[in-house]
Image (cartoon, rainbow, N blue to C red):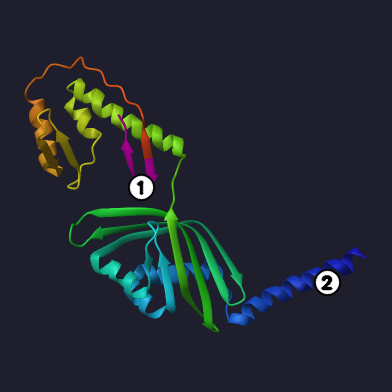
Amino acid sequence: MKAPFLCFALLLISAGSFAQKTLTGVAFDRAVFDSIMGRYAQDPVKFLNTETAPDFVLVTSDGGSFNAERTRQIYERNTPTGRSYESVVVRQYGNTGVGTGIVTHSYVGKASGLPVTFRELFTFVFNSPKPGQWQIVSAHHSPAMSGTPIAHEAAIKKVIEGVTTSMYARDFKTYLNYWANASYVSRVSTDREGKVTKKTGDEYRKTVEQYATQNLKPSQEKATRENWLIRVNGNSAFAVFD
């Protein structure tokens, strides 16, 4: 009795696969997903004009909600420089396709010239309005963290401790290595008289390099920290402490 039952089960599986293909004209599989995402990467504006549903919605990792028009405006301010996918899972339910995974996408701001990279979890939903055609209905992004929250917090504390230790040791080369070498870097400080000083980018690096020429003696001061509040959001974070 096992053999007839096995044949019947295989027939059901085959029939189900055939139904998925004939319902939409083409199966929604990884090859179809890659083809769609390839067209998106090649010309995002054209893709948003021609391959999105009329009620398309993008939900960003910071909670923003964009229709196709507002999504196109992102590319008026930024030039895409790279896009890759990992851990992709593709599923099909009749004329609906779903893709999930991790996307890493990079941009350069047209006004600032600054590069930005995001690594995010994604869920893309597609439908097939007619046989052989797929269009994206919605896209949802959320931050994708590599490592654990504990590991991130430890790494952040290590940088902050390293900044202090190298400054007290007057090891300015090591000190600068803890800072990003970019124009958006900034340091704001207040002295004992309440004067606020802000330096950014190369201006701050040059200030530190000037200290290095003064042959300052290492400081014997000690620093302790408590009441940490650290929040990691994607590839950015902030830390508050006493």
Q: Which mark is residue 235?
A: 1
In which image quadrant can residue 217 be found?
Answer: top left
* 186, 84: nearer the viewer: 186
Callout 2: SS = helix
Q: Is residue 167 depicted above or below 27 in this figure?
A: above
Q: CA distance from mark 2 to mark 1?
A: 52 Å
Residue at point 52%, 83% (across, down): 129
Element class at badge 1 = loop
Q: Is residue 214 above or below residue 107?
A: above
Magenta stretch: dominant secondary structure = strand
Name the outermost residue toward the bottom: 130
Residue 120 position by quadrant: bottom left
> From this viewpoint, is residue 58 visible?
yes
Label disc, if present, on residue 8 of the rendered structure = 2
Q: Position of residue 55 (x, y in %)?
A: 43, 77
The single residue placed furthest to the top in the displayed view is 220
Query: Which quarter of the rendering shows the N terminus?
Result: bottom right
Left or right placement of residue 108 versus residue 50 in this view: left
Q: Earlier in the sequence, mark 2 or mark 1?
A: 2
Which amino acid type is marked by label 1? Asn
Q: Give x and y (percent) for residue 220.
A: 20, 14
**In terms of image quadrants, where is residue 160?**
top left
Q: Amino acid at mark 2?
A: Phe
Which residues fall within the magenta stretch?
231-242
Which quarter of the figure is the C terminus placed in?
Answer: top left
- Contact (Cβ within 8 Å) of mark 2 with mark 1: no
